[in-house]
Image (cartoon, rainbow, N blue to C red):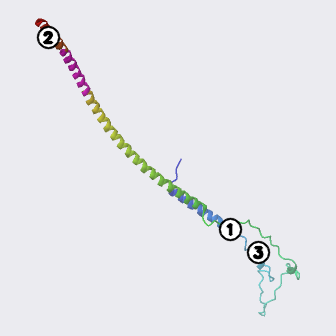
Amino acid sequence: MNKLSPRNLLVAAALFGIAAESAWSEEATPSVAAAPAEQTASSTTGPAPGYAPTPNRRGYAQSWRQPPHRPGPPPGYYDHFRPYYPPYRQYRSVPAAPTENPLSAKLKQTQEQLAAKTSELNTANEQLATLQAEKEATRVSLQQAQSETALDMEQLSVVMEQMDILNNVLTELKARLDVQNTSLLGALQAAAAENN
């Protein structure tokens, strides 16, 4: 699925706003308002169009009169009968155009939410970087402690080996000392027996 960039969204919102404003202006202005005024102007009495007075041979203008096949209306015709005009069409009430385009308001709200989310994301990224730095420092100190512990364990094992060797030596020396004590005690007892 293709994602729209913020610039394309802004252009689309502007086009929708222009289309909405033009639709509002076309609905709000009636297009048939001038028709009755034009028809009332044509109801004046006078000669039919296309008949102009022609001067006679002496140069005087002839009087106006209708051609014989088109007699004029009877007297008082226009007083009794009004010309028929279709009833004025009732237009549905159009709500007033909003002072602010709802699409631009929605776009503005979306941009504000996007800015808030971006700032939250930046804060979260900073916290993540801090935690990663702390984790790295902890890992380094743990490795150092582990290496120190391993060195201490090696030294402890060497000391334990040396203590085992010393214990063995001491055990041998004690055994020799016991043998010598026993032989000395026997010699003393023999000497005392001889003196008696």
**Residue 28 has which mark?**
1
Side of 111 relative to 95 (left or right): left
Q: Which numbered disc, 1 or 3, marks the residue closer to the eye? A: 1
- Which numbered disc flags the more N-terminal residue, 3 or 2? 3
**Distance of label 3 from label 2 (alpha carbons):** 161 Å
158 to 144, vertically: above or below: above
Residue 141 position, x and y percent, is 33, 41
User: Which amino acid is tagged 1?
Assistant: Ala
Q: Is residue 8 magenta?
A: no
Q: Which residue is mark 3?
A: 36
- Which numbered disc flags the more N-terminal residue, 1 or 3? 1
91 to 129, vertically: above or below: below
User: Which amino acid is tagged 3?
Assistant: Pro
132 to 55, vertically: above or below: above
Q: Which residue is mark 2?
A: 188
**Distance of label 1 from label 3 (alpha carbons):** 20 Å
Q: Which residues are magenta?
A: 159-177
How would you classify the magenta stretch by its main secondary structure?
A: helix
Q: Nearer the viewer, residue 167 or 108?
A: 167
**Residue 105 has which mark?**
none
Residue 162 position, x and y percent, is 23, 25
180 to 83, vertically: above or below: above
Contact flag, marks 1 and 3 (Cβ < 8 Å): no
Q: Secondary structure at mark 3?
A: helix
Q: Nearer the viewer, residue 130 or 106?
A: 130
Residue 103 position, x and y percent, is 59, 60
